[in-house]
Amino acid sequence: MSLEQIVVLALIQGITEFLPISSSGHLILVPTLTGWPDQGILADVMVHMGSFLAVVVYFWRDCVSLLAGSFDLLRGRANPWGKLAMLILLGTIPAVVFGVILDKTGFMDAARLMPQIVAWNAIIFGSLLYLCDRYGHSIRRMSDMTFTPALIIGVAQAIAIIPGTSRSGITMTAARALGFERPEAARFAFLLGIPAIAGAGVLKLGDAVASGESISLDVVLTAVLTFFVALGTITILMKLVRHVSFLPFAIYRILLGVLLLGLIYSGIPLGIVN
């Protein structure tokens, strides 16, 4: 990849992974709109791993508490952090099952060639984001998380595997619909994403290595740049959600979807260069 492509991919992934506007959808659109060769699944996985490390660093206190709580549970000592760790594990299961199904059926590879999927999902889930944030109550905090809401948010995360949906967006949407405060919805969405992103990254990297694909220097550089951009994005977003609604993100998603559909159905080619 060229230096220009590395910087663009890092900026797009680092910013869009945590804003509720879909990072996978934007990554697919990069080669579609620029004419650059498709960066490939391996590059996508590596930039997601850069985002994953950013979440762990930003929420390191929560991560340490979750690990300590998990060890306490194994020793038979129940505590709130141990309970939350189990709920996060529960919420991860639907994404694992759905991800395996889509991967084995070849849907994910096909979706990379279909920008209309990104467009429609941007509009549909952008609208849901606004409605749930606008009309959802703010009566729950993360300490109120129980089996049922954790599973519902986990199912929402599974749907986000489809490009254009946005993992952070749909999990925040589900949490707001269930009455969680906006900052708490964002916090749980990020923590829930840690095992999902890590697990998917490890599996994809394993598949790439097994198939003889090498992790090149440009891919590693893209992941490193993504980490720093993502860390800054999380910091800004966690401050914003205390004072600003999700309306700007919903508007952006809808406008993006409409623009893409206009380009697609007007006959303008948006093919990916291999």
Image: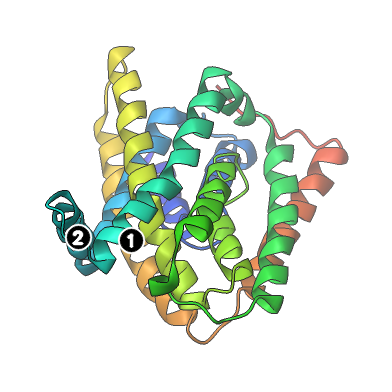
Q: Residue at x 59, y 61 (%)?
A: 174
Element class at badge 2: helix
Q: Residue at x 62, y 49 (%)?
A: 165
Quarter of the view holding residue 233: bottom left
Labelled pair 2, 1 in contact (Cβ < 8 Å): yes
Q: Is residue 90 left or right of residue 270?
A: left
First in sequence: mark 2 vs mark 1 = 2
Amino acid type, mark 2: Gly
Q: Is residue 52 left or right of residue 119?
A: left
Amino acid type, mark 1: Leu
Asked whether residue 66 is in view, the answer is yes
Asked whether residue 58 is in view, the answer is no
Q: Nearer the viewer, residue 20 or 141?
A: 141
Q: Residue at x 57, y 81 (%)?
A: 138
Element class at badge 1: helix
Where's the C terminus, which quadrant? Answer: top right
Q: Nearer the viewer, residue 200 or 253?
A: 200
Residue 107 at x, y = what percent?
Answer: 61, 24
Q: Which residue is mark 1?
A: 84
Quarter of the view holding residue 77: bottom left
Q: Residue furthest bottom?
A: 243
Q: What coloring was used for the rendering? A: rainbow
Residue 175 at x, y = what percent?
Answer: 55, 65
Q: Which residue is mark 2?
A: 69
- Marks 2/1: CA distance? 8 Å
**Placement of 253 over or under 97, stated as above or below:** below
